[in-house]
Amino acid sequence: MNGCIVAFCCEHSAYPAADLAGRLRLHYPESLRVIRVPCAGRVDVIHILKAFENGASAVLVLGCEDGACHHITGNTRAKERVKYCNMLLKEVEVDGRPVAMFNLSPNTPHKFVRAVNEITKIIKESGR
Amino acid sequence: MIIAERKPMEEIKQAMAPYKKVLVAGCGTCVTVCWVGGEKEVEILASQLRLARSAEGNEIVTLEATVERQCEKEMVTELKDKVAEVEAVLSLACGAGVQTMAELFEDKPIFPAVNTTFIGMPEKEGLWVEMCGACGDCFLDRTGGICPIVRCAKGLLNGPCGGTRKGGKCEIDPEKDCAWVLIYRRLEKQGRLDLMREYNPPKNFRAVKRPGRIQAVKI
């Protein structure tokens, strides 16, 4: 997993968006590892920390658009957890590892690619 | 329940600095409910420690365990095998839990990862407030079930003081309600306002001899 970007993708939005990006032959960094989750709200702080422990250079949590979560509040919970996770990483002075949350719809493969490219840019800028 | 707060990460990191293998031990009761020392917090703290140490190039191995109540010897005994494997224990329990652990495993250094702060209750999600000072001489029956010892900033037995703000807020902290205004309103609802006129004599703070010890009668 060394150096890769781990993307936790909600099966209702980001996962179909990633699928569509593939079918449209859109390019995104090959270091991306997609993990399908039933909802962004399923992603816990410990999953993100464990990804870093296993060598990930960044973690993406990709969920439904605001107000469109199939589980009502999964995406808002995920956003809070991402914020909390950034605080935990800062506490142990490993805050150079970005964790970000993006909201997208299943029919927005370009947005998916943009999110991956954005986090890749942050990693490159931080020199990791 | 007992409310605690996690110690600053820097302090925990420094305490763990000499060790290569530690047990992070949680407690499944009070500190789980106040989000500082349950199974989840144990996982997170252990992971944070591993990340911090691996960033320093000085890896640490962590074992993780949470017992139902760390303040009961029978339950802490379950950790015997794990404690035997490690150099030190980082406990996320309250002071009673840490001491139970220290008593059972005398040969191992036990480090508290939390500061035990007070006896309280959750006011809303994620907010705990102090409710009881464990004074050993309860007079809540006379104050409508509101303890002025801890909820009044001055701990007044006969209140309110002259500083109550408009809207019934405390003069010391305008965010907090004046305990004596709350007491007045509660007694008013109960039709027991006559209690406000009664004098509460100075409290016997020696009711509980320290260290406290109570022997219950077996029935």
Image (spheres, coloured by chain):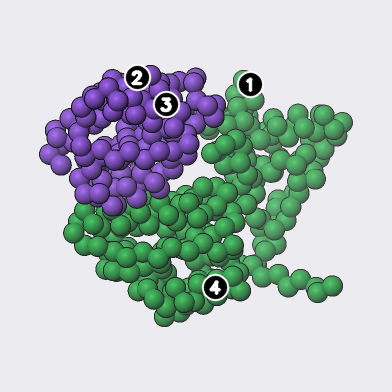
Chain colours: A purple, B green
- Please determine if labels 1 and 3 lie on a single subunit: no
The residues bearing labels 1 and 3 have C-alpha atoms spaced at a distance of: 49 Å
The residues bearing labels 2 and 3 have C-alpha atoms spaced at a distance of: 9 Å
Element on which disc 1 rests: loop
Q: Pick the residue in front: A92 or B192.
A: A92
Which mark identifies residue A108? 2
**Residue at the spot 60% in from the left edge and 35% down from the top edge:** B124
Which mark identifies residue A100? none
**Mark 1: few/some/many CA within 10 Å (<14, 14-19, 20+):** few
Check if mark 4's residue and mark 1's residue have beta carbons within 8 Å: no
Residue A19 seen in render: yes
Q: Which residue is mark 1?
A: B167
Q: Give the mark toward the camera: 1 or 2.
A: 2
Element on which disc 2 rests: loop
Q: Give the mark toward the camera: 2 or 4.
A: 2
Which mark identifies residue B78? 4
Q: Residue furthest right?
A: B191
Q: Give the mark toward the camera: 4 or 3.
A: 3
Amino acid type, callout 4: Glu
Residue A103 seen in render: no
Amino acid type, callout 2: Thr
**Mark 4: few/some/many CA within 10 Å (<14, 14-19, 20+):** few
Q: Pick the residue in front: A42 or A22.
A: A22
Q: Pick the residue in front: B39 or B4.
A: B39
**Residue at the spot 50% in from the left edge and 25% down from the top edge:** A69
Please give left or right for residue B157 compared with residue A46 in the image. right
Chain letter of mark 4 equals B
**Mark 3: few/some/many CA within 10 Å (<14, 14-19, 20+):** many
Q: Which residue is mark 3?
A: A13
- Please determine if labels 2 and 4 lie on a single subunit: no
